[in-house]
Amino acid sequence: KHSFKMASVFAYQSSEVDWCEDNYQHSDKVAEFYNTVSSMSFFFFAPVMMYLLHPYARERSQAVHLIWVMVMIVGIFSAYYHMTLSYVGQLLDEIAILWVLAIGYTLWFPRRHFPAFIKSSRSHFAWLVFFTASVSTVMSFAKPTVNAYALNSVTLHILYVLTLEMRSCTDKRIHRLAAVTVGWWLLAISCWLSDRLLCGFWKQINFCYLHSFWHILISIAVAHGTTLFAYFDAIYEIPEAQPEVKYWPSASREIGLPYLAVKNKEKTQKCC
């Protein structure tokens, strides 16, 4: 009986969530073909952002790269989930997203907004985030169907923190980056909600691919958002590095992927 239960959670379509895309239309081994393929977008953006943010990570903390390692793990579990629609695939995907958020909070949550009992200690705050994420991981097994809604609701708090940061920022380029970041997120979450809640309409017009758009759009939004929070972090934590937002591949235009350029402290000291 126990082995049967274990086998059932790995079984195809054992998840309670089935997205709008028709199953097994292109392969008898892949439940949701386009949702599976679009999960590869995480593998495109993650290595590029690791490369672009490496100078910042070198000056601030190599742990910055852990965010993008986790994003690639999200891509692996997302592809597995949409390929199988299994209970385990759903849980692994959602838990990986949870830990991406946890690492992001640990690295970039502004020290000045820490709870009073933390006393501006990032290591203490990191333990608080680790404990909260661990409890949330265990709780995610209780009701998997609500996990995705809960994870997306965390974005509302991130937007709140972003609003607090923007109040003290006078750089118009950063304001434009914030607006573009929120715009990408709104497009992404609109696709996610529409695919989830209005599937009947999309099936009527034979367009059931909005969740695959979500994968691509949220990857772009995450790239923009991490650069934005890295900028605020660098401004307060390593101002001597003179952080500046630039864009790849065109450094002269605000088009493409944003990243944080910094001055190397050792080179600056030698020049002086």
Image (tube, rainbow, N blue to C red):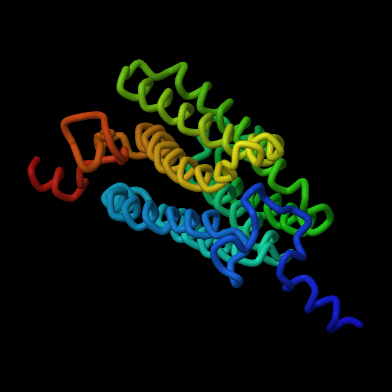
Q: Residue at x 35, y 58 (%)?
A: 47
Extreme right residue here? 1
- Image side of residue 53 versus residue 81, left or right: left
| Position of residue 85 measured from the top left corner of the image (x, y, whole percent) | 68, 62
Count of marks, rendered view: 0
Residue 251 percent location from the top left of the image: 18, 36
Q: In the picture shown, does residue 155 fall above or below 63?
A: above
The image shows residue 27, relative to residue 164, as above or below, that is: below
Q: Is residue 115 left or right of residue 229?
A: right
Decide: is 64 above or below 108: below
Residue located 60% across and 48% down the image: 124
User: Does residue 57 lie above or below 242 as drawn?
Assistant: below
Which residue is at the front of the view, 239 or 56? Answer: 56
Please give left or right for residue 19 compared with residue 188 in the image. right
Pick the quarter of the image with the N terminus: bottom right
Residue 6 lies left or right of residue 201; in this view the side is right
**40 or 243: which is nearer to us?**
40
| Relative depth, front residue between 34 and 101 | 34
